[in-house]
């Protein structure tokens, strides 16, 4: 795993970061909804 090209790292890191960001946004939206009610 020493000679992984940058493209492989991008394809591994980008989906993970996207899922983390989406889950964080959904949590924030749920908290806002609960506060609004």
Image: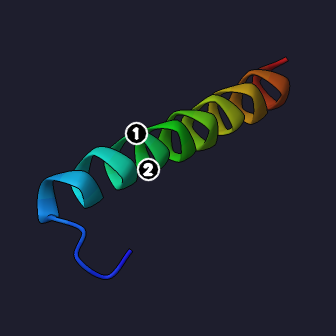
| Drawn side of residue 2 relative to residue 30, left or right | left
Q: Is 4 on the left or on the right of 16, as rendered?
A: left
- What's the mark number on residue 17? 2
How many marks overall? Answer: 2
Which quadrant of the figure contains the C terminus?
top right
Checking the image for residue 4, the label placed there is: none
Crowd tier of the residue under label 2, counting other residues whose Cα lies within 10 Å: few below 14, some 14–19, many 20 or above: few
Label 1's element? helix
Please tell me whether residue 30 is drawn above or below residue 4 in the rendered image.
above
Q: Residue at x 48, y 46 (%)?
A: 16
Q: Is residue 36 left or right of residue 1?
A: right
Closest to the observer, 12 or 27: 12
In percent of width and height, residue 35 lies at 81, 31
Residue under the image location 31 percent in, 82 percent down:
2
Q: Residues within 10 Å of mark 1 (few under 14, many from 20)?
A: few
Give the quadrant of residue 23: top right
12 in relation to 25, above or below: below
Q: Is residue 18 left or right of residue 4?
A: right
Q: Residue at x 52, y 33 (%)?
A: 22
User: In the depicted view, which residue is nearer to us: 20 or 12?
Assistant: 12
> Label 1: which residue?
15
Decide which of 30, 36 is in the foreground and name it.
Answer: 30
Dividing the image into 4 quarters, which one contains the N terminus? bottom left
Toward the bottom, the furthest residue is 2
Q: Residue at x 74, y 21 (%)?
A: 33
Q: CA distance from mark 2 to mark 1?
A: 6 Å
| Colour style of the rendered protein structure | rainbow
Give residue 8's position: percent from left, percent from top.
24, 53
- Secondary structure, mark 2, is helix
Please provide percent x and percent y for residue 10: 23, 53
Pointers 2 and 1 in contact (C-beta within 8 Å): yes
Q: Quadrant of residue 5?
A: bottom left
């Amino acid at each position: 795993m020493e000679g992984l090209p940058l493209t492989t790292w991008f394809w591994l890191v980008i989906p993970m970061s996207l899922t983390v960001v989406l889950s964080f946004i959904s949590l924030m939206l749920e908290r806002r909804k609960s506060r609004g009610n």
